[in-house]
Amino acid sequence: MVFFLTILSFLPLLYLLYILLKVLETKRHQNCYLLDYQLYKPSDDRKLPTEFCGEVIKRNKNLGLNEYKFLLKAIVSSGIGEETYAPRMVFEGREENPNHQDAITEMDELFEYTIGKLLRQTGVSPSDIDVLVVNISMLACIPSLSSRIVNMYKMREDIKTYNLCGMGCSASLVSLNIVQSIFKAKKHQLAMVVTSESLTPNWYIGNDKSMILSNCLFRSGGCAMILTNNPSLAQKCKLKLNCLVRTHHGSKDESYGCCIQTEDDQGRVGFHLGKSLPKAATRAFVDNLKEIAPKILPIRELLRFGILSVTLKMLHYGRKKSTGSTRPVINFKAGVDHFCLHTGGKAVIDTVAQSLGLSEYEVEPARMTLHRFGNTSASSIWYVLGYMEAKKRLKKGEKLFMISFGAGFKCNSCLWEVMGDLEGEENVWKECDIECYPPQTLINPFMEKYGWIQDEDIHTFKLPE
């Protein structure tokens, strides 16, 4: 009888223990791990050297001297080198009239290279994939590109597919957020994310300066990755996703219209980059940092920042705010070891680096990615990650902070934890001879070859034949 009563008295405790174990088990299956990823390296016949860039610009009959000068200045100061890649139709001289099949072919080459290599290096079968998320912002087709991949690799009938359009350069973190949400509801999942941009149907041939700028920055590229929430695969994974925050300022007209696909005065479709873009990006960036900082920084740094902020407010209370007064700056390095910045352009990298107080060594991966591959839209941050891995910078337990910007206007960021020392063996940067980076100079030789445009008089200038 005493034994029976003893067992009964322990039942509530055993029940609580059962609930606790169940919660811990559920949380264990809700983690999001990056198993592996594969970057896209187009063939060498698609490289854009300086000489050929000049030919592409000169054969645009819609440009005048002012536009030539603007392009020259933009290219020289862009931070982009001579080994970036463009769609095939540019090399065939058909950028004015590409067809739909050109765009599909561009995507097929990307899918075959990245997905094919990724499946081989991970040993994952296409039939093992439970979730597929594809983000190509500026190409919508029927059937969708996700359906095209399912057909190409004969994936399962019950696979869950998502096809994202119009999400801009920050789309890959949007895709991650979708996968992360699915992982919280289902156990032992394998998800594939394919992220890129379609340049073929979006090459601008007009003379609107706010639109021709995109031709100088955007280049061909892409990435495919496999993620999982299966704890048994954790030791084989490269990264663990700790936190992800998305900030969207689409409700503000200025932010919504600063980065938009539209038509110029002649009805030519292009991608408009407005003068309010820096302001919109800064505003979204600041709001995003405010939300993610408490989630990724240690308590001591948050306390230091809070105490310093209150102290400065008390010191300046009742005084007129002086223009020279300094504001307290939160130190993100207190909780982050590596910074993976979106390569939207030299100005974007410089602004983010200054805001976070980053050194040239910390910004080097973003600068080298812009120089070697250009702005590859949503896949840019993965090339930055690839550079860090190829340079063997990522060690077990270190934290990696990713920041991306996109039309809308959006700023998305996330924090990864490195699961083991990464060597970067299966990496396109190895093929680029990583030991040659960083080069001694990032100066674009465009000025040397086409600097004569700056000296031409607008009244005597003759357009190319």
Image: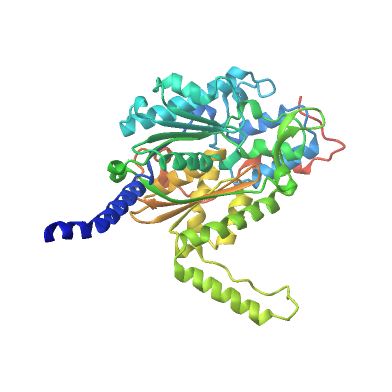
Residue 410 in view, yes or no:
yes
Q: Position of residue 152 (x, y in %)?
A: 44, 20
On the rendered image, what quadrant is the N terminus found in?
bottom left
Name the side, left or right, on which 449 lies relative to 307.
Answer: right
The structure residue drawn at horizontal position 83% and vertical position 40%, both measured from the top left corner, is: 457
Question: As displayed, is residue 237 above or below residue 197?
Answer: below
Name the side, left or right, on which 33 lies relative to 278.
Answer: left
Question: As displayed, is residue 94 above or below residue 198?
Answer: above
Q: Nearer the viewer, residue 382 or 186?
A: 186
Q: In this figure, which colouring scheme has been used for the structure?
A: rainbow
Locate residue 52: give its quadrant: top right
The structure residue drawn at horizontal position 73% and vertical position 81%, both measured from the top left corner, is: 318
Q: Position of residue 244 (x, y in %)?
A: 49, 50
Question: As displayed, is residue 24 above or below residue 84?
Answer: below
The structure residue drawn at horizontal position 27% and vertical position 55%, both measured from the top left corner, is: 17
The structure residue drawn at horizontal position 71% and vertical position 26%, both measured from the top left corner, is: 59
Name the side, left or right, on which 68 lies relative to 423.
Answer: right
Q: Position of residue 124 (x, y in %)?
A: 33, 30
Q: Nearer the viewer, residue 363 or 400?
A: 400
On the rendered image, what quadrant is the C terminus found in?
top right
Locate residue 119: give its quadrant: top left
Residue 421 in view, yes or no:
no
Q: Position of residue 183 (x, y in %)?
A: 41, 41
